[in-house]
Image (cartoon, grey):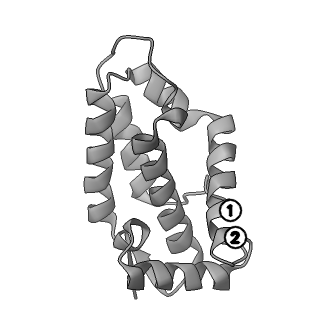
Amino acid sequence: MQLTRFGNRTLFAGLAALMLAMPAAAAGKPPLRDVAQIDDRMLWVAIAIEISDRCDSIDPRTLRGLNYLWGIRSDAQKLGYSTAEIKAYVDSDAEKSRMRGRGEAYVRAKGLNPENDADLCKLGQAEIANGSQIGAFLRMK
């Protein structure tokens, strides 16, 4: 599963733009990777993007995703993260690799293969049916 491959999707690009627009803040906070209310939510978005990129029968709900990303931005801003900290988190190859690993682990925990597009479609359908946060970013074509 390549959670860093976002193609022409505007969802992740929108996140990066929103995060980079944040004002500078004080230091002494944990890295964003350790802030579950940010990192976990980024994971849900990344998984949804990956599913919509690799499953022809599922589309992204882009506006819903962008609104959700505004919420992440707002929460990060309230926690005092600077533009540089956000940019480092979003652009970091190490963080992208770690997030990819988290996404693959999530797919495997569901009994599916993250390398198999059909399995990602099954996951997407299940997430939509269950009304999960991942499913909220997706719709059947």
Q: Is residue 6 above or below residue 24?
A: below
Residue 54 is situated, as x and y percent measured from the top left of the image, at 59, 75
Name the secondary structure under disc 1. helix
User: Going 65% across and 82% down the picture, which residue do you hit?
Assistant: 119
- On screen, residue 64 versus residue 35, left or right, reads left
The kind of residue tagged 1 is Glu
User: Going 69% across and 45% down the picture, which residue do you hit?
Assistant: 97
Residue 139 is situated, as x and y percent measured from the top left of the image, at 37, 81
Residue 66 is situated, as x and y percent measured from the top left of the image, at 30, 55
Mark 1 surroundings within 10 Å by alpha-carbon count, few (fewer than 14), some (14 through 19), many (20 or more): some
Residue 31 is situated, as x and y percent measured from the top left of the image, at 52, 26
Which image quadrant: the C terminus?
bottom left
- Mark 1 or mark 2, which is nearer to you? 2
Which image quadrant: the N terminus?
bottom right
Q: What residue would you read off at disc 1?
A: 104
Using the image, tell me which numbered label, if any, was put on residue 108. 2
User: Going 46% across and 42% down the picture, which residue do you hit?
Assistant: 36
- On screen, residue 141 versus residue 89, left or right, reads left
Q: Is residue 32 above or below residue 40?
A: above
- On screen, residue 121 versus residue 114, left or right, reads left
The kind of residue tagged 2 is Arg
| Residues under numbered marks 1 and 2 in contact, where contact means CB atoms less than 8 Å apart | yes
- On screen, residue 3 versus residue 136, left or right, reads right
Q: Which is nearer the eye, 50 or 112?
A: 112
User: Going 47% across and 59% down the picture, which residue do you hit?
Assistant: 44
Mark 2 surroundings within 10 Å by alpha-carbon count, few (fewer than 14), some (14 through 19), many (20 or more): few
The quadrant where residue 93 appears: top right
What is the distance, in whole Å, between disc 1 and disc 2 at their CAs?
6 Å
Name the secondary structure under disc 2. helix
The quadrant where residue 130 appears: bottom left
